[in-house]
Amino acid sequence: MSIVEKLLQILPQKQVSNHTDQLNVVSKDESTLDAVIPLAVVWADSAKQISEIIKLCIQTKTPLTTRGAGSALEGSTIPSANGIVLDVSKMTDIIEFWVDDLQVKVQPGIIYDDLNRYLKRESLFFPPSPGGSGDLATIGGMVSTNASGIYSVKYGGTKEYILELEIVTGDGTIMKIGNRAIKRSSGYNLVDLITGSEGTLAVITAVTLKLAGLPEGRLKTAFKFDSEINAAKAVSEICKYGIDVAAIEFLDKNVMEALNLLKDYKLQEVPALFLEFHGSEEVLQSNNEMAASICEEFGGTELKLAGRQNPWEIRHFVTDAIKHRKPGYTILRNDVAFPISKLPEMVDYCHTLSNRFNILIHAFGHVGLGLLHALILADKTDEKKWSQALEINDLIIKKTLKLDGTISGEHGIGLGHKNLFELEHGNAVSLMQKIKKQFDPQDILNPGKIFDL
């Protein structure tokens, strides 16, 4: 009996498919890694169904990869060979909403922007906006990678908002971890352990989040600089002085050029910082004046956007702009993070590599967190050029580790940066492997991601 026939014994026919077109859809994510066609895709609607699916996978020794929107950037949702995909994108219910406690419980498939539209009616929001993918990213996916975004410099990343999880472990056990208390000192922090584990320890079936109130006011502004280094120094200084900035995004000259090519924004093609402040009018003006003063110290002046454009609408299209800059080329990406004082050194290093190897690198990111994306454009069909691009990507990551940074600040490891994982974590990897075996004894859940057993 095939795996599809066995799945149909526990699920309705409409929730199981091995149709070629549907298998192709779930065979890849937004990374540049090769697709893997699974044996089947299943759409679950409850923790009980997921438990039964996992138990069947154990019996048949079938790998299981959980998927939401498929917007992962490091291959963490690419299926395993001869495996199946568990698609939770239809699990989109808001289970319970405690307005007075500023908390909500949701299923993992609900999309970030959809959740915030619902919360807005009560003047609340879930802050860690996932960059330019809020219209795609699911809450379950954000938990799985501990996603962050433009507002994380003020409000923190996803893990700061997770109170409670319902999960199904690799042996099919359904359990609740955490609770609705804002502060707790009871037992091991299993919630944080699952957060960022990329589907390798358990399947998330419900998430209880704490929320924040919508700010009284917002002020968006932008500054231009004569060099990437001066822009980076301004960021470090703004953070050093503790200015209450809600968002601070860095875009280098190459990024500004790419945006103009894609959308004709009429941007000045110079390095820039996009900033946003939250609070009362008095607070907004005070913080803006202090930030402007620091930017001026490093040669920064106000960047006026044509037609009163929203800087975050522009920022939304950065990756698309880079992707379309050279038709036929492929993006090789990273999301390194490091102490904020090292930002100027990292920005300078990326542009030094670009000049040395004569290869196009676009640097941008949530720099208030010390998080930088250095996207490399290369021709994947040219073996020599692609090999060189891979080498440059590894050099950027290794430089970050020398600066006491991390391989990934928000996208996770998946398959994309697995080769350097041990370089960051050393003998702690063996402890992680033991933890993996406790949650998933048969190595059924997303095997081969992050590290191998």
Image (cartoon, grey):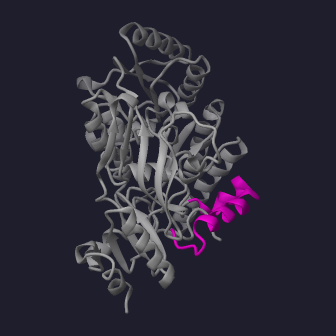
Residue placed most toward the observer, 426 or 298: 426
Residue placed most toward the observer, 5 or 388: 5
**443 drawn magenta:** yes
Q: Is residue 93 visible?
A: yes
Q: Residue at x 47, y 36 (%)?
A: 252
Vertical placement of residue 160 versus 421, above or below: above
Is 1 positioned to the left or the right of 411 in the image? Answer: left
Vertical placement of residue 379 versus 81, above or below: above
**402 drawn magenta:** no
| Tag count | 0
Of all residues, the one furthest to the right in this rendering is 427
Quadrant of the rendered image containing residue 116: top left
Q: Is residue 362 visible?
A: no
Residue placed most toward the observer, 176 or 269: 176
- Image coordinates of residue 367 in percent, x first then y, are 53, 33
Is 236 positioned to the left or the right of 58 in the image? Answer: right
Of all residues, the one furthest to the bottom in this rendering is 1
- Image coordinates of residue 185 in percent, x first then y, are 63, 38
- Image coordinates of residue 84 in percent, x first then y, are 41, 75
- Image coordinates of residue 170 in percent, x first then y, are 53, 68
Is 216 positioned to the left or the right of 55 in the image? Answer: left
Q: Residue at x 67, y 51 (%)?
A: 398
Tell me the quadrant of the picture where the N terminus can be found.
bottom left
Q: Main secondary structure of the magenta part?
A: helix
Tell me the quadrant of the picture where the C terminus can be found.
bottom right
Q: Report the span colored magenta.
A: 417-445
Vertical placement of residue 198 versus 251, above or below: below
